[in-house]
Amino acid sequence: MMTISRTLYNRCKKLIESNEQGLKYDEINAEIRALSGLGHKQVIPASKRTKQKIYFKLRAGEAEELQAFIKAEIGLDVLTDLYCNGDRIANAARHNDEKVGANASQDIILVNNAAGQLKLNQEVSSLFRSIHAAGQDLRHSMIDSIEHDAIIICENFTPMYYLHQLKNNPVFKHALVVYRGDSQNGKRADEVKRFIDKHQSELPLYYFGDYDPEGFSIANSFQVDGIILPDISQFSVLTNVELQKYAGKDKFFPQLNQGQSYLNVSAYPQSWHAHINFMNKFQLGWQQEHLLGADIDWSLYNK
């Protein structure tokens, strides 16, 4: 019996549901292909703006074959059943195979607080004062109450280690910061979404990410109450040289839809327009890491 991970299961599901587009070829698609000799590679010629792309596609009738194969292997139907968050310890005792039906991440999320105190389930846990930590990995299914005044989704991992720099910022001081996680299906991001869905009605939800088109898009996708961005009054007086210095590579045009030369402000709240217009003007994007390293002031911009 082959162990089919949740990542592979979700990728199979996506491929079966939208096979006309195929999936960009990588090690996961190679693993799908190896399941029972399904599918083929399709080479898309390079254009002036893109490198050569290789897509993995199923032939006629193979979607049903793959669906049936997975059903026989692990008893789940990719079109109707979610890959369960099993427990590897419990599975090892029952099945002598800890990986069947259990992803290593389970329902784990990474949380932190700029002031070094996590307040959950009416308990307070203090983080190290002398060691910079990304926070604590917790099983979110066991969180019954959150005694913070807001939840902040942090786009990138490294800034989780630098939240102490923001401990005096009132937006961060009493907030629970959650690492967004890997954006691929089946990775930690799925668990973060489940956690957010459960608690979003209880507390304000803010987004802290890169100042670029994708950052605004992600914030919108979470339906946040506000976005944390560089203070526009400070940021707008930086020189062109400073703006270029802090900008990240490929943080503007590659993130726009094909044919666009700016991010359309009409899709976003009025309070975000000044930042979007400023970004469009200079056609640049700025990463969290660069801005934290430059000691830029951060402010909350509510919807």
Image (cartoon, rainbow, N blue to C red):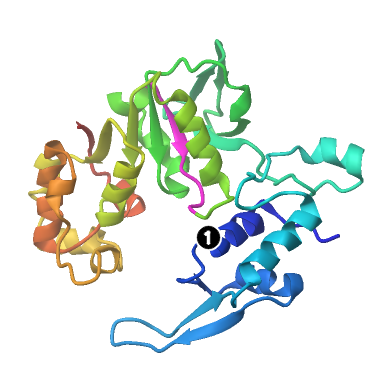
Which residue, given by chain and number where applicable, does mark 1 sit on?
Answer: 17
Tell me if 258 is positioned left or right of 52 in this view.
Answer: left
Q: Which residues are magenta?
A: 174-183
Query: Compared with residue 259, is residue 201 higher up or lower down, i.e. above or below?
Result: above
Q: Residue at x 73, y 77 (%)?
A: 37
Q: Image quadrant for the N terminus? A: bottom right
Q: Residue at x 74, y 70 (%)?
A: 35
The quarter of the displayed image where residue 248 is located: bottom left
Tell me where residue 218 appears, x and y as whole percent.
34, 47
Q: Residue at x 75, y 46 (%)?
A: 101
Tell me if 150 is positioned left or right of 112 in this view.
Answer: left
Tell me if 110 is positioned left or right of 61 in this view.
Answer: left
Tell me where residue 84 appears, x and y as whole percent.
68, 41
Front-most of residues 52 and 14: 14
Tell me where residue 27 appears, x and y as whole percent.
63, 71
Tell me where residue 293 appears, x and y as whole percent.
33, 50
Q: Is residue 132 visible?
A: no
Determine if the magenta segment contains residue 116. Answer: no
Query: Compared with residue 62, is residue 124 higher up or lower down, i.e. above or below?
Result: above
Q: Which amino acid lies under the numbered mark 1 shown in the image of this protein?
A: Glu
Residue sitting farthest toward the front: 61
